Image: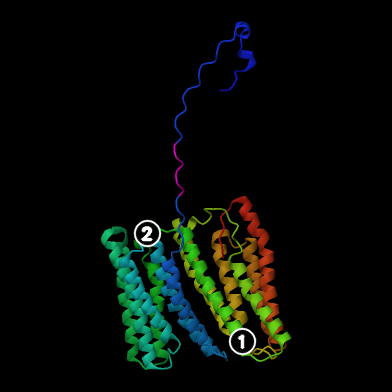
């Protein structure tokens, strides 16, 4: 017990001090509450990601050793349904993930269908058999997601509106996917597929009121999109390493080309995760504001597509390090990087405002990357890769102070 202040003591007490009363019994300390477990991607989700690694790889391989505008456009178009299947599975797992036997069996059936997508997507447009296999696999993967919602809706009425919207939308677009086979392979079939894909992407926006009550785990959602970004960056790493292994060139040229290609991949990773200093809870707007949530989710489509397109050309670039990239290959490589920087800048602008320093830095970096297209016919591949890597590195360095300032001030931030 603390000693009383001197000015409260009396003379008598000073002469004949009385014993201090025994201290009151202290209540037993309550055990500290266990902190809530942080939601992280499960091992099962990571296994499912492996299936999408195969699908994304087959899409990027469509560009081939000699990229053309047609092959790049085809790969970009087919990336969208693969990406959408991943988003549907990621969002479903974000809303509910019991990880029980029933859930695993349904999801594994869906992943088997995604494996079918990976098998056929590389040959879509080249044979009717591949087209049928691709569409059948894609619709089966969507059906597995609908079945997962149906099982969840049996015990939780919150998911019944989502199930109704998802089932109705899937049935409507399935008519377009399958009805396209009434036309021979070509523009008419592809146009119907594009309409079906557009309808699927629009469905969450049209049914927003029905899905608004669904829970959103912000950290888990951000982690999942970060992991898919790692997948597409991994394709870039695989592309340049495979190109180096298969090429024949001088050792010094191989080293410089590999170093520049690796620096570019590392820079893409760095810029995506460069805002990792933000304060906890800075992304709560994703859960409460549908505009931010939609911008975050759909903004990742061009961002991750840009990396995938760049990855598709990187292997071609390193395979001819002593020559120059043709216009199509250079457009894929540099255009993909510029698209990624632009998309992530616009995502960030939705959270921080369009005049925020990091937004302006990324848009400047995108413009500088596109400006390198004029150099492609005149400089060897290693120099072009080094210039692109330098632009991305300069972007990361220039925007870092802005991330640190936002972390210190506690303002809302976004990692992208």
State the image quarter where residue 115 is shown.
bottom left
Where is residue 288 drawn, in percent x and y? 44, 56
In this rendering, does residue 169 appear at all? no
x 46%, y 48%: residue: 35
Q: Which residue is mark 2?
A: 214
Asked if disc 2 and disc 1 are in contact, CB closer than 8 Å, the reply is no
Q: Which residue is mark 1?
A: 245
What is the magenta segment's predominant secondary structure? loop
Between 194 and 17, the residue placed more toward the observer is 17
| Label 2 – label 1 distance at C-alpha | 48 Å
State the image quarter where residue 173 is shown.
bottom left
- The boundaries of the magenta stretch are 30-35
x 55%, y 60%: residue: 414
Q: Which quadrant, please, contains the N terminus?
A: top right
Where is residue 299 drawn, in percent x and y? 51, 69
Between 316 and 361, the residue placed more toward the observer is 316
Under tag 1, what secondary structure? helix
197 inside magenta stretch = no
x 58%, y 53%: residue: 411
x 38%, y 85%: residue: 134
Give the label, 2 or 1, closer to the camera. 1
Kindly give the residue lying farthest to the left in the view shown.
154
Where is residue 88 drawn, in percent x and y? 40, 70
Between 350 and 106, the residue placed more toward the observer is 106
């Amino acid at each position: 017990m603390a000693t009383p202040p001197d000015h409260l003591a009396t003379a008598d007490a000073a002469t004949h001090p009385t014993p201090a009363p025994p201290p009151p019994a202290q209540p037993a300390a309550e055990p500290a509450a266990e902190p809530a477990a942080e939601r992280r991607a499960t091992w099962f989700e990571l296994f499912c990601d492996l299936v999408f690694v195969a699908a994304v790889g087959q899409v990027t391989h469509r560009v081939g050793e000699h990229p053309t505008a047609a092959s790049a456009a085809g790969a970009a178009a087919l990336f969208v349904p693969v990406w959408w299947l991943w988003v549907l599975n990621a969002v479903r797992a974000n809303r509910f993930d019991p990880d029980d036997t029933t859930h695993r069996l349904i999801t594994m059936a869906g992943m088997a269908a995604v494996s079918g997508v990976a098998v056929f997507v590389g040959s879509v447009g080249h044979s009717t058999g591949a087209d049928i296999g691709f569409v059948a696999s894609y619709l089966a993967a969507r059906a597995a997601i609908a079945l997962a919602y149906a099982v969840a809706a049996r015990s939780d009425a919150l998911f019944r509106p989502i199930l109704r919207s998802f089932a109705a939308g899937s049935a409507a677009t399935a008519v377009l996917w399958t009805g396209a086979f009434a036309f021979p392979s070509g523009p008419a079939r592809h146009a119907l597929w594009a309409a079906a894909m557009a309808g699927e992407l629009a469905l969450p926006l049209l049914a927003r009121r029905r899905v608004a009550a669904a829970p959103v785990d912000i950290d888990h959602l951000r982690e999942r999109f970060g992991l898919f970004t790692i997948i597409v960056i991994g394709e870039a790493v695989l592309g340049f390493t495979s190109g180096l292994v298969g090429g024949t060139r001088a050792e010094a040229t191989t080293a410089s080309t590999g170093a520049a290609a690796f620096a570019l991949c590392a820079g893409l990773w760095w810029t995506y995760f460069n805002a990792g200093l933000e304060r906890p809870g800075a992304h709560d707007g994703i859960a409460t504001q549908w505009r931010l949530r939609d911008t975050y989710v759909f903004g990742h489509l061009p961002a991750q597509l840009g990396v995938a397109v760049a990855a598709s050309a990187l292997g071609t670039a390193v395979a001819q390090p002593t020559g120059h990239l043709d216009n199509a290959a250079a457009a894929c490589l540099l255009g993909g990087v510029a698209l990624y920087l632009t998309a992530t800048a616009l995502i960030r602008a939705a959270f921080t405002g369009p005049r925020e320093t990091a937004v302006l830095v990324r848009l400047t970096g995108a413009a500088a990357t596109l400006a390198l297209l004029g150099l492609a016919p005149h400089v060897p591949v290693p120099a072009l890769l080094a210039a692109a890597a330098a632009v991305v590195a300069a972007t990361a360095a220039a925007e870092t102070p802005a991330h640190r300032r936002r972390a210190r001030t506690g303002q809302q931030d976004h990692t992208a």
